Amino acid sequence: MIRLDSIKVSFGDFNAIPHLDLHVRPGEFFTLLGPSGCGKTTALRTLAGFIQPAGGTVTVDGKDVTRLPSDKRQVGMVFQNYALFPSMSVWENIAFGLRVRKEKGADSDRMVRDIAHRVELSDEQLAKNVAELSGGQQQRVAVARALVLRPKILLLDEPLSNLDAKLRHQLRQQLKDLQSEFGITTVYVTHDQDEALAMSDRVAVFNKGVVEQVGTPQEIYDHAATEFVCNFIGDSSTLTPEFVAQVNAASGAQLSTRASSYLRVEKASLDAPAGGGTAVGLPGKVLSRTYHGLHSRYVVRSHGADIRLLVREDGGAHPEPGTETTVYVRPDHILQYHSETGAALQEQDRQDQAVALP
Ligand SMILES: Nc1ncnc2c1ncn2[C@@H]1O[C@H](COP(=O)(O)OP(=O)(O)O)[C@@H](O)[C@H]1O
Ligand SMILES: [Mg+2]
């Protein structure tokens, strides 16, 4: 559906995007995720036709659109700040693109009303000035304004980031429902990993203008391909070589003690897992406990590593800070990355790098 091949974008002598290949499938909800300044907006604007790349091609539906102006690409775009026309009514904002296209009369009116209802804007709200609406309502106007033109592709640049947390959660689901109802191929930009995991069919994780990994939310979470992705997504503890060596000693695993090693918070436990399995218990000391309602967050120091983990409030032991305890981990849950390249270690690399223990 959408292909970016060898796209390169520079601002003066700054290479914002050195080399980008992306392939978005028809009907897909595809997210560009990465920290601020990594080139997400630049990639989206290149796709929309607001930026001319210094190299590479943009293809939509098999057609090369690299040199096509934005208004000929059939893309709808929603900007972070909405970019609505403040002196116009909600109705006029949504109808703006239709006016430009010289679509008039009953048809145009019907399209505006239809799309407004689908994003849950009432007739009363349609008559208001946009400045009278809340942030969340303005965001819907921006989406309606893009969708009314029946674009082939919908591009959304951090559309929820100006809203408060609760509203953001609500609108997340509404946007997602709207997208699947319309079945429109969507490229979504966010720096919020939670949003990306919850909404997307697939995610591309960006770092400094380069895609580090493309995959489903689960692939990216469970099998982060690089150290950057592992750190950016989810919540992990950094393990020390001593800790990894002790896991090897206790389990017979052959993890590398020279790699950068991590463990997700939800993979460590203070309870021996039922049935034993491959988990090993290592001695540790509770450094801190913070209460979060559903669970407590612990930091337990073991073999020089500060292991962060969660204990549900309705089950398990709740040792106090200063207490000696045991932390349970499974060797196959330890994520390992080459300490120089940041690439995920495969089983064979782990064994090659494993250090013989005394
Ligand atoms: N028009 C521009 N001129 C010069 N530098 C720019 C311009 N637009 C973006 N940049 C730079 O390109 C990099 C990527 O920016 P951007 O795509 O906006 O990142 P993101 O959307 O991921 O926060 C940043 O370092 C930014 O400062
Ligand atoms: Mg941006």
Image (spheres, grey):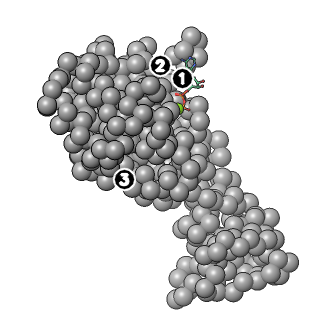
Q: Quadrant of ligand 1?
A: top right
Mark 3 secondary-structure assignment: helix
Q: Earlier in the sequence, mark 3 or mark 2?
A: 2
**Identity, as a three-letter code, of the amino acid under mark 2:** Val
Residue with the mark numbered 1: 16
Alpha carbon distance from label 1 to label 3: 33 Å
Cβ atoms at labels 1 and 2 below 8 Å apart: yes
Residue 144 position by quadrant: top left
Residue 253 as seen in the image, left or right of residue 153: right
Numbered tag placed on residue 174 in the rendering:
3
Q: Within 8 Å: ligand 1 and the Cβ of disc 1?
A: yes
Q: Position of residue 204 (x, y in %)?
A: 44, 42
Q: Position of residue 255 (x, y in %)?
A: 61, 63
Q: Earlier in the sequence, mark 1 or mark 2?
A: 2
- Residue 115 visible? The answer is yes
Residue 52 as seen in the image, left or right of residue 281: left
Q: Nearer the viewer, residue 323 or 226?
A: 323
- What residue is drawn where x is 20% and y is 36%? 111
Alpha carbon distance from label 1 to label 2: 6 Å
Residue with the mark numbered 2: 9
Residue 107 position by quadrant: top left
